[in-house]
Each structure stands twice: as C-alpha cells, then as structure tokens.
Amino acid sequence: RVATPAQKPPITTTDEFALAFDIDGVLIRGGHPIPAAIQAMRYINGENPYGVKIPYIFVTNGGGKPEEERCADLSRQLELDVSPGQFICGHTPMREMTEKYHTVLVVGGEGEKCRIVAEGYGFKDVITPGDIIKAKHDTTPFRKLTEDEYRNSRDRDFSKINIEAIFVFADSRDWAGDQQIILDLLMSKNGRLGTRSKTFDEGPPVYFSHNDIVWSTSHEHSRIGMGALRASLEALFKCVTGKELTTAHSFGKPQLSTFEFATRLLGQWREDCHGIKTPPRTVYFVGDTPESDVRGTNEFNESHFSSDVTWFSILVKTGVYQEGTIPRYPPKKTCEDVLDAVKFALEREL
Ligand code: G3P
Ligand code: MG
C-alpha cells in the first residue's frame, strides 16, 4: 500500500538485498547523468513509497583517475555523496600487482593522470609512453609531444631499464603511438627497449583494466573501447611475429575476480556504512553491456551457486544494449532505465 505524504513511514535500511550499478550507459553518458539516474538514486535513498533505503555500490570498467577523484565527479553528477568505499573501477585490482612488478609501463588516460594513479597504488617505477618518446623522438614517426607532455615526461636512460609489465589503465589517446610502443616491448628481450627477441616470447605481460569492445558515450552509437585496442594489438602481434599473443590479460567485468572483489566490497560497505553484518540474500546488478555486466553477473552466480548471496542481472536500454537486438548474454530482467530497474528490484523484494 502506498502511503500518502502525511503518513510517510520512517525510513529503514534493508539488510535483505543490495544493489550494484554499472556507470557508463546506466547512470552517465558522455559525462552527463542519464535523466533517470538522479531520480533512481533518490529512490534508493528512501524517497520511495515504502520508506526503504537500499545499500549499493558502483562497479565500472571505466577509470583513468584516482578512485577519490572519480567518486567526487560522480557525487556531483548524481547529486549525492559517493564514497571510494562503495566504488570499484577497472584498474582498482591492479593495486594488488605492486609487489610483483617494480618497473612498469602505464598506458592511457589524460596527461599524467594514470601515472599518478599507478604511483598512488604503490608502483615504484612508473614509465609512460611520453617518457619513451621524449628519450627517442622517432619511436613513433608521426607523434610529436606537446610542450606540456614534453615537460611532464621524465628523462630516462632506456638502455639500462627492463620494463617488467605493461598496464593499460585507461583508453589510449594515441592508438598508433601506444600500440607501437607496446609492440616494441612485447617483441623485446625482457622488456628492454631497442632489443628484439628471436622467439617473441620474452616480452613483458600486458594487462588491460577491462575488455569492453564498445561502450556507451554521448554519441548515438556505441564507441570502440579498450577491448578493441586489445583485439587490435593481438592482430598486429600476429601479423608482425606470426605468433599468437599469449601474455595479454584483462581485469574488470565480466571477470569472476571482479565480482568476488565487488561482493567483498559490498559486505564491508554494508557493515561500515549501515552496520549490517550479514550478507544480502540478493544483489541486483544493473548494467547496459551484455558481454560485461550480464555475463559477469550470471557467471559469478553460477560459479557461486552454493553461497548465501545470489547476484541478479538487470539489463537497461540506455546504453550499449539497444532495444530490438538479442543480447548475447540474456539477463534475468530487462528494464527501460535505471529508475525502472530499482523499482523492479524493490517491488520484487517486498
Ligand atoms: O571505458 C569504460 C567503459 O568501457 C565501460 O564503463 O561503467 O559501463 O563499466 P562501465
Ligand atoms: Mg556500462
């Protein structure tokens, strides 16, 4: 029964279920909130006919900024406080690799942002493509550093440096240059620039923060993303060396480890923010990309079918998935937009 304003029930937080949101194509497109997003956030924070508040987290494949900065952006866009304690982005799990690799190449993003993120995670020696071009201007024939890039790039002697791993933190702003540099390293002996392996199996591994071939922006059609760069690099490596690239890895959705991480983060967030110590029975994940969001949610659920927590996939029509197409990974429920999705979840639980 819907209460009239005069009889509004007191707001209570449910410990029975929770929500997890993808960002691009669900809440944000091209830097601006999707109209239903702000209303959906208000709805789950108690502005609903039942006076129920639902705990939630955000799980995006995007990145390119420190988590704190990304949460500040999201807080402004969605008109509510978003804490890093309820937020995972594509490169968040890379922070667990700092013990394994000392000297790393970090690719993608605006200016020096990703170097700052990587150093914030604890990587000791972070190199960017700019450092490499500064040291050898003909590394990539048609790419010239701007004055700012030249000033910010560091002076290094690459004849003495072994790059142990490559991390693509965010979308490349220069596909040609970045691919040339990554290829040089993949074909090198032990990540030493200027060398060439005879067997092409001595280069460093390359880690991508996710594998989305396309993503949703302000453009009416999906745009190519980091997964496309990976596909391109794999094809180039094959063309140039005649071998398969076997040392590329992706984090992010749909990886099971990302959903495991999200489950742990949600547990911690429910406890820290809401004082809830028990796991939710159901986590509704609202996403727009069948290959990442729906696939990851469904597969995580299948692989953890004996656990207490069930993840439930909801696909919305405001992003990559477009009405009239058949999603490759079918969701448990399809909704118009995120507001429709949160209403569905709450009503299913009552
Ligand atoms: O580059 C980000 C994009 O591929 C997807 O972001 O929020 O939809 O997971 P999101
Ligand atoms: Mg998305």
Image: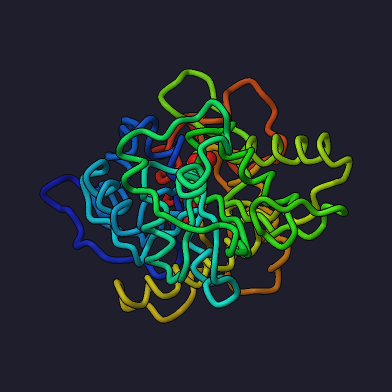
Instruction: Kindly give the residue lying farthest to the left in the view shown.
Output: 6
Quadrant of res 175: top right
Q: Is residue 56 visible?
A: yes
Could you tell me which residue is drawn at 26 percent across and 41 percent down? 77
Quadrant of res 322: top right
Residue 246, horizontal then vertical, whole percent: 80, 54
The answer to whether 242 is drawn above or below residue 115 in the figure is above
Could you tell me which residue is drawn at 55 percent across and 30 percent down? 320
Residue 281, horizontal then vertical, whole percent: 53, 68
* Horizontal side of residue 194 vs 209, given as left or right: right
Numbered disc total? 0
* Horizontal side of residue 241 vs 300, given as left or right: right
Residue 57, horizontal then vertical, whole percent: 40, 59
Q: Quadrant of the C terminus?
A: bottom left
Q: Is residue 2 visible?
A: no
Could you tell me which residue is drawn at 30 percent across and 54 percent down? 71
The answer to whether 291 is drawn above or below residue 17 in the figure is above
256 or 106, nearer to the observer? 106
Could you tell me which residue is drawn at 41 percent across and 46 percent down? 342
Residue 329, horizontal then vertical, whole percent: 70, 41
155 or 118, nearer to the observer? 155
The answer to whether 133 is drawn above or below residue 224 in the figure is below
Quadrant of res 149: top left
303 or 241, nearer to the observer? 241
Color theme of the render? rainbow
* Horizontal side of residue 139 vs 92, given as left or right: right
